[in-house]
Amino acid sequence: MDWSLKKFKGYCIVDLPKNVFQKEKIEALKELLRDLSENDYNVFFLNMGQIPKICSKSLGHIINVYKFANANDMEVKLYNLHPYVSQLIYQTRLNQVFDICEPDAGFSAASPQELSLSQACCSSFR
């Protein structure tokens, strides 16, 4: 599968497609993360901008990716959440498990400058 991604020093932004929450695509995502981590990328921002809705099965897939990343010394952070997705994550209290970048943190993936991780995901560095 071809993934849309942006690489920066030590971290990478992966744009998730709308249909990412299928078992084979999740496995392909984990393989991509593993390959990138072998090339010194250990922090991954998952851009969820193309995912307007999510269900419990999809949340389970995200948990699976988090467990995989944790077992392989990687960090995964979610950003660009649609309001419905964000609301569901907060209602299920999975925001205590997931690292979520707040939209007002000054994070802009389109910026040609490198991201400041401390600005992008302030909650991760408390």
Image (cartoon, helix red, strand yellow):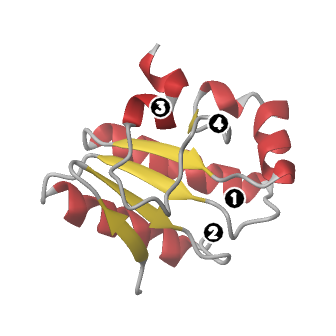
Of circles 3 and 4, the one toward us is 3
The residue indicated by pointer 1 is 58
The residue indicated by pointer 4 is 102
> Label 2 crowding class (10 Å Cα cut-off): few <14, some 14-19, many 20+?
many
Q: For marks 4 and 2, give the CA distance.
A: 22 Å
Q: For marks 3 and 4, give the CA distance.
A: 10 Å
Say if 42 sits above or below 33 in the image.
above
The residue indicated by pointer 3 is 119
Who is closer to the viewer here, 103 or 66?
A: 103
First in sequence: mark 1 vs mark 4:
1
The residue indicated by pointer 2 is 21
Badge 3 element: helix
Who is closer to the viewer here, 25 or 79?
A: 79
Give the percent coordinates (x, y) of residue 99: 54, 34
The answer to whether the residues at label 1 and label 4 have Cβ atoms under 8 Å apart is no
Q: For marks 2 and 1, give the CA distance.
A: 6 Å
Residue reaching furthest left?
Answer: 39
Give the percent coordinates (x, y) of residue 75: 36, 40
Which residue shows up at 80% across the image and 57% down it? 55
